[in-house]
Every structure is written in structure tokens, then in C-alpha cells.
Image (cartoon, grey):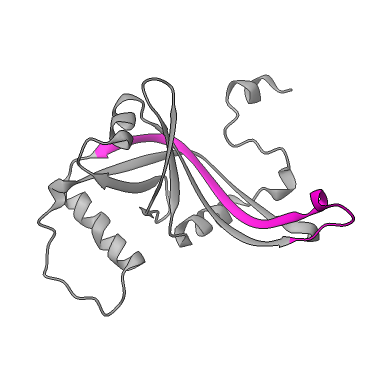
């Protein structure tokens, strides 16, 4: 096996024919609603949490949590490496003659990179403007401004490695 692959397996796929083009992976990531964010705590335990996110292209992805000093925040403060996964599941194609020949239709994107906490209130307001555009309804109205920005922690992940993977089930 390639020594560099052993040292850093990020972005390497076993089934290379499922690899999506970078532009397609980025386009898919822009359209999804939930990301699963993985971090590691000081004892080495993995922690995965579903979060809403903003990705508009480029090399930054944004998520947020409350400012209660929770598990996620503590992990990022001690180990800033983060892995994000977003996926869409399709049908399961029945295999023959055995169940283990069945195949799932899916698309997924995995993003690796380091995260930092964003303190800038303008950047936090930008984030919530994007959240409302992505997740809100067009007829929603609000008072202007975000008076509770100090109640959230905004994280910016710098994307170092991104891979997209697509399976068409039994039809590939």
C-alpha cells in the first residue's frame, strides 16, 4: 500500500469509480440541510453531532452551537480538527440471489479540516442571514438585527480535504 496513504488516509477511496468530481461534491454540499460534525475530546473519544451548516463554495464551512461550553466547543478548543459529513440516501436495490448482494443508492460528501471559533459579530450576523435564507420560509418576517449573537458560538472550518462519493446501487 502507498506509504502516504497510510500516513494520511483522508480523501482516499477504495472504490474510486464512486468518486465525484470536486465541483459536483461542492454543489451537493451546498444543497444539503444537515451535517454530521465529528470531533475528538481530550481523552481521545470521538463525538458526532448533527448540525445545520452554511457552505457557499470555496474553502470555508460554518456551523454553530450555543455558548454553554458544551462537548463540541470543548473539543474544538482542545483539538481543532473536525470532519463534516453530509449525505442523501436513495433506495436500496434488491440483490440476487442473496440479500448481501443488495446495494444502497446514496451520495455523500466528507470534509476534513481545522475549525476555529469566530468572534466577529458581523460574521455571526452574516451566518444567520444565510441560515434564514437556507432554512427559513420566504414569508417569515423579523425585527431587524440579532441581539443575541453572544449566545452562540460560530465555527469556521477551513476545508483541507473534500471528497464526494456517489453510488447508483446495482446500476453502476
Q: Can residue 153 be seen in this view?
A: yes
Q: In screen coordinates, is 7 left or right of 140?
A: right
Total numbered circles: 0
* Residue 170 horizontal/vertical position (percent): 79, 58
Magenta span: predominant SS is: strand
* Residue 152 horizontal/vertical position (percent): 20, 47
Magenta stretch contains residue 106 = yes
Please determine whether, in this image, residue 31 is positioned above or below residue 115. below
Q: Which span of residues is magenta-colored?
A: 93-117
State the residue at coordinates (33%, 32%): 76
Please determine whether, in this image, residue 78 is positioned above or below residue 70. above
Residue extending farthest bottom:
139
Instruction: Return the residue nearer the eye: 153 or 114.
Output: 153
Q: In screen coordinates, is 69 left or right of 96?
A: left
Q: Quadrant of the C terminus?
A: bottom right
Please determine whether, in this image, residue 62 is positioned above or below residue 39. below
State the residue at coordinates (71%, 23%): 2
Q: In which quarter of the image is the N terminus?
A: top right
State the residue at coordinates (28%, 65%): 132
Please determine whether, in this image, residue 145 is positioned above or below residue 41. below
Residue extending farthest right:
97
Instruction: Return the residue nearer the eye: 122 or 90.
Output: 90
Q: Is residue 172 visible?
A: no
* Residue 167 horizontal/vertical position (percent): 69, 54
* Residue 72 horizontal/vertical position (percent): 33, 36
Magenta stretch contains residue 159 = no
Amino acid at each position: 500500500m502507498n506509504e502516504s496513504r497510510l500516513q494520511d488516509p483522508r480523501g482516499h477511496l477504495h472504490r474510486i469509480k464512486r468518486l465525484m468530481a470536486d465541483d459536483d461534491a461542492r454543489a451537493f454540499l451546498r444543497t444539503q440541510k444537515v451535517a454530521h460534525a465529528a470531533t475528538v475530546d481530550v481523552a481521545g473519544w470521538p463525538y458526532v453531532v448533527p448540525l445545520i451548516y452554511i457552505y457557499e463554495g470555496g474553502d470555508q464551512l460554518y456551523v454553530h452551537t450555543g455558548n454553554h461550553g458544551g462537548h463540541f466547543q470543548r473539543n474544538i478548543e482542545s483539538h481543532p480538527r473536525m470532519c463534516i459529513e453530509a449525505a442523501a440516501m436513495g433506495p436500496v436495490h434488491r440483490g440476487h440471489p442473496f440479500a448481501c448482494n443488495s446495494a444502497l443508492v446514496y451520495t455523500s460528501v466528507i470534509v476534513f479540516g481545522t475549525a476555529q471559533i469566530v468572534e466577529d459579530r458581523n460574521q455571526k450576523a452574516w451566518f444567520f442571514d444565510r441560515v434564514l435564507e437556507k432554512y427559513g420560509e420566504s414569508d417569515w418576517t423579523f425585527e431587524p438585527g440579532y441581539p443575541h449573537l453572544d449566545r452562540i458560538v460560530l465555527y469556521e472550518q477551513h476545508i483541507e480535504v473534500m471528497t464526494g462519493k456517489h453510488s447508483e446501487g446495482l446500476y453502476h
